[in-house]
Image (tube, rainbow, N blue to C red):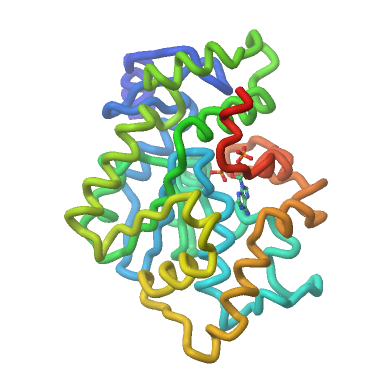
């Protein structure tokens, strides 16, 4: 069985990777080879429940931010955004990625079980690759999308920092060509975004699309929109302060300056250990112009 799976994976089309040696094309999208077993298990075994809330994104589109916001919105009766003490709000002492599991990484390393406890989960998979139970259940999906040129610049910086030392450096020019040719983790970018967009047009009660840029410009408006969409709207009382507190706790300035995100590291379920600071760079709209 494992041999069949390995043979299947090694026969998939291959291209050089950004972070690791190779990307494999599976069901039309490129993925790091090491993620494919987890993706296969996720597709076969994930049991989606109606109360699951799934955050989906193309990498470097604002996943960390949305993890913090959704965690804060859904847990606001347990943790106040202003609880700064060490035993207060978990976002003060945990990286947002520790609060919301990423399914394809979790699955590959938990005895092949793709079902974490929390109902708030995240994946970078394209819509057509999601487990069928996720598509057919009444669960809600929040998708965040970002200007692709900023995604490219952010992805390149991220890859340069994480790239395996056995590989030659990845130049920006190479990354540019790979991105434009659709050969990037979870890419092609446009196919990824358009699948979510087109499904949102048909099933707007199931999929909400947010843009990184609009969230940056109108955070309070978008946090209320998120809460309404997931069926957990803010009360009139909460609208006087709680929404702003959540926006402020999850802001780039606040999160990137927390000790846990400045000097902390995190062991990911796939065994890699990554510095938390890598998820916080500039958070600027239009940084692509500098490249
Ligand atoms: P830049 O590299 O352009 O700075 P992801 O979380 O999907 O990996 O995306 C990472 C990008 O989101 C990085 O962009 C990072 O700086 C930015 N980011 C991280 N936390 C943020 C926050 N709280 N608010 C806005 N942007 C944030």
The x and y percentages for residue 216 are: 55, 55
Q: Is residue 136 left or right of residue 63?
A: left
Pick the quarter of the image with the C terminus.
Answer: top right
Q: Residue at x 53, y 17 (%)?
A: 175
Q: As rendered, which of 99 and 220 lies closer to the eye?
A: 220
Q: As rendered, which of 258 and 35 lies closer to the eye?
A: 258
The x and y percentages for residue 120 are: 46, 62
- Note whether residue 113 is visible: no
Q: As rendered, which of 52 and 115 lies closer to the eye?
A: 52
Quarter of the image where ligand 1 sits: top right
Q: Is residue 29 left or right of residue 106?
A: left
Picture quadrant where residue 89 is located: bottom right
Residue at the limit of the structure toward the bottom, as seen here: 237
Q: Is residue 159 left or right of residue 31?
A: right
Q: Is residue 29 left or right of residue 91?
A: left
Pick the quarter of the image with the N terminus.
Answer: top left
The x and y percentages for residue 55 are: 43, 55
- Note whether residue 118 is visible: yes
Q: Residue at x 73, y 77 (%)?
A: 83
Picture quadrant where residue 77 is located: bottom right
The x and y percentages for residue 114 are: 42, 50
Residue at the limit of the structure toward the top, as seen here: 168
Q: How many numbered discs, if any?
A: 0
Q: Residue at x 67, y 66 (%)?
A: 249
Against 111, residue 174 (above or below) is: above
Picture quadrant where residue 134 is located: bottom left
Residue at the limit of the structure toward the left, as seen here: 202
Q: Residue at x 33, y 63 (%)?
A: 140
């Amino acid at each position: 069985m494992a041999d069949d799976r390995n043979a299947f994976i090694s026969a998939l089309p291959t291209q050089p990777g950004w972070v690791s040696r190779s990307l494999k094309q599976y069901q039309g999208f490129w993925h790091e080879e090491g993620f494919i077993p987890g993706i296969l298990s996720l597709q076969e075994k994930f049991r989606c429940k109606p109360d699951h809330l799934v955050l989906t994104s193309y990498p470097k589109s604002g996943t960390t931010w949305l993890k913090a916001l959704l965690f804060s919105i859904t847990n606001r009766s347990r943790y106040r955004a202003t609880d700064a003490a060490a035993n207060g709000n978990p976002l003060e002492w945990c990286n947002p990625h520790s609060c919301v599991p990423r399914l394809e990484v979790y699955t590959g390393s938990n005895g092949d079980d793709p079902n974490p406890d929390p109902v708030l989960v995240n994946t970078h998979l394209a819509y057509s690759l999601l487990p069928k139970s996720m598509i057919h259940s009444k669960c809600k999906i929040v998708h965040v999308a970002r200007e692709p040129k900023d995604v490219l610049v952010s992805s390149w910086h991220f890859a340069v920092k994480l790239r395996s030392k056995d590989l030659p450096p990845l130049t920006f020019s190479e990354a540019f060509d790979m991105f434009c040719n659709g050969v990037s983790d979870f890419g092609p970018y446009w196919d990824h975004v358009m699948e979510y967009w087109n499904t949102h047009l048909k099933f707007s009660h199931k999929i909400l699309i947010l843009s990184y840029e609009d969230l940056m410009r109108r955070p309070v408006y978008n946090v209320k929109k998120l809460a309404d969409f997931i069926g957990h709207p803010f009360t009139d009382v909460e609208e006087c302060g709680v929404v702003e507190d959540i926006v402020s706790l999850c802001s780039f300035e606040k999160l990137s300056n927390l000790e846990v995100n400045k000097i902390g590291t995190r062991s990911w379920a796939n065994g890699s250990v990554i510095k938390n600071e890598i998820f916080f760079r500039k958070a600027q709209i239009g940084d692509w112009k500098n490249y």
